[in-house]
Image (cartoon, grey):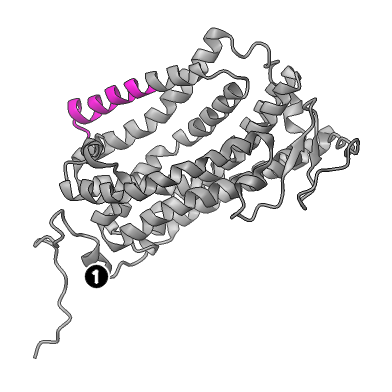
Amino acid sequence: MFCGRLGNSVLAGYGMASATINITTAATGGGLGLAADTLISQTFGGKNLRRVGIILQRSVLILLLFCLPCWALLINTQPLLLLLGQDPEVARIAQLYVVCYLPAVPAMFLHQLQVAYLQNQGVILPQMYAAIAANIANVVTNYILLNWLDLGLYGSAAANTVSQVYICVFLYLYIRWKKLHVETWGGWSCDSLQEWDGYMKLAIPSTMMLCFEWWIYEVGGFLAAALAVLQGLVLASTKTVIGFLFTSDGHIVALVSKLLNVYCVLQFFDGLVAVERAGKRKISSVSAPDTLTARHRENGDEYMNMNTNGRDEEPGVEEKPPALLSTAQLVLRRGLTTIAALFILAVGIVVHLTVPLPEVSNAVRANTTLDSNFTTPSSFYIPSTSISS
């Protein structure tokens, strides 16, 4: 709404940054967090309230570690976009937005877990209150940074990051204020370091399911942007009059209006997510390669594998609870996991600092710098390929 007033290139860069974050971070982290949905809902239903807090702690630790490989990929957004044929200026702006967004990645994951924690206990209104407060604060922040302090692109990127932190902090403060955590939170416990394998048995297929769903939408944005900046803006706008909230370019709004007529029909199929919290993701991922599912025992203690051939297990037959890891095993396994995540981040930083940006051909430059009139600006210089005699 605010960055669109800074120009088409800024809006395109913001759209590319959003798509990059969605594909590489939001979809994957969101999939990992879906395991918490299933575990918390079934554990709370089994009246094992204190264990709900343990599951939340385990989810927090796993997702905070997952931030490190996400950062390793995000800091290399610009070269990745250039390799995909994006406009250099759009890729540069997208890199700025993404780098500024790095501190907001943990807040995004934590907010997702907060929502799962409350929603699966039947507590809904606090999320609405926090969202309203965060949106108001976001508008005020954008106005101050863009209109009052006139920080332009940098102010827009900073406001985008702070907005994600707002909603996480506001929801946390509301939970503490209303003491919504008292019954289920018994304080931090070493038990949260146990049973990561069982958590990942749910998290991995959940991630695959969510990634394939999100990538279907986002890949279209990358392909459109590879044709031209103007077409790439389509997926970052909305329909008809609402589109003018994001940009004053009538050509963009008209294109979006046509595309969203088709998109609206797809919302019907989002009803398939109703089975997620039952742990039966096979139903909602028929078109995705999901063959691993799990069902949580009613007391919320352990897992019981589901039969992947579609038939229910024999009644009364349950797997033995997994043996708990010793302190030495916990230190070794969780330590190696942390080291691996830090190593991936270090590799990403080294690549960012040492690998030069890919070369962009003149054909790509000429194709991706169209203005709102579908013409290349006269100030854009393309070297001649003719041989002078």
Viewer can see residue 134: yes
Callout 1 amino acid: Asn
The x and y percentages for residue 247 are: 21, 41
Q: Is residue 147 magenta?
A: yes
229 relative position to 121: left or right:
left
Q: Which residue is mark 1?
A: 362
Q: Residue at x 63, y 37 (%)?
A: 275
Q: Secondary structure at mark 1?
A: helix
Q: Nearer the viewer, residue 254 or 107?
A: 254
Label 1 packing within 10 angstroms: few (<14), some (14-19), many (20+):
few
The x and y percentages for residue 101 are: 41, 38
Which residues lie in the magenta part?
Answer: 134-151
The x and y percentages for residue 150 are: 18, 31
Q: Residue at x 28, y 22 (%)?
A: 140
Tell me where residue 64 sits by quadrant.
top right
Q: Nearer the viewer, residue 290 or 387?
A: 290
